[in-house]
Structure formats: structure tokens, C-alpha cells
Amino acid sequence: MLKALRCVDIVRPYYELEYTSACKELDVDIFVIGEDWGKAAHNLEVESFLRANGKSIHQVSYHPLTSSTKIKERTIAQLRAIA
């Protein structure tokens, strides 16, 4: 779903809570975080890296209509309905 957005250049899944290496590899300009972003060590590490390199961090607010969990649930339900 994210890849379909014109404003998105790259969608990269992650399997561990470590973001700095991907930010370095992709040379990101903007890093988007959700409202639930906390102050865990891995988050502080990537924030420090991004700020030190003049990159932007944008936090988006939660909204029930844009909940990724709800979007996934609706998509799965629609697929099941047509199957």
C-alpha cells in the first residue's frame, strides 16, 4: 500500500528495531514516526544520527481512519469477501 503512494520513494520492511543502518544505507532525508514513538535506545540512536546529519524527523498523529492495523483488517476482509 505504501509503495503505491507517489510521495514514497522506497518501502523497506524491517525485522528488528534498528533503524540507523537503513537510514545510512538509503541516505534518507525524511524519517516518519508515529505518535507511539517512544524513547527506547534504538529510537534515540536513529534520532541522534538523523539530527547530526541534518535530516528531518516528522511525527504523524494517530487517527482511527489511518490506523495501519485497521487498514490491514479491512483489506483482508475485502479479499476474503471476493475469494
Image (cartoon, rainbow, N blue to C red):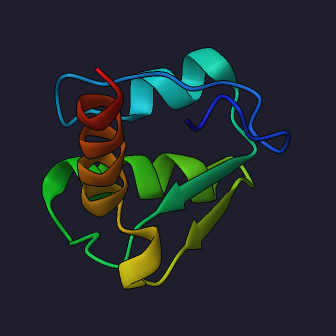
Furthest toward the front, the residue is 82
User: Could you say where residue 67 lies in the image, as x and y percent from the top left?
Assistant: 35, 67
User: Could you say where residue 43 lies in the image, as x and y percent from the top left?
Assistant: 28, 55
User: Could you say where residue 52 lies in the image, as x and y percent from the top left?
Assistant: 61, 53
> At x 70% / y 26%, what residue is drawn?
27
Determine whether, in the image, residue 29 is placed left or right of residue 73. right
Depth order, front residue of 15/64: 64
Q: Quadrant of residue 18?
A: top left
> At x 59% / y 38%, what residue is drawn?
2
Determine whether, in the image, residue 45 is placed left or right of residue 27. left
Depth order, front residue of 8/83: 83
Furthest toward the right, the residue is 6
Determine whether, in the image, residue 17 is placed left or right of residue 45. left
> At x 40% / y 47%, what residue is drawn?
46
Furthest toward the top, the residue is 25
**Relative vertical location of residue 5 with respect to residue 23 in this rendering, above or below:** below
Assign the C terminus to one quadrant of the image: top left
Depth order, front residue of 68/59: 68
**Relative vertical location of residue 73 with respect to residue 11 in this rendering, above or below:** below
Assign the N terminus to one quadrant of the image: top right
Determine whether, in the image, residue 77 is placed left or right of residue 8. left
> At x 16% / y 54%, what residue is drawn?
41
User: Could you say where residue 69 lies in the image, as x and y percent from the top left?
Assistant: 25, 56
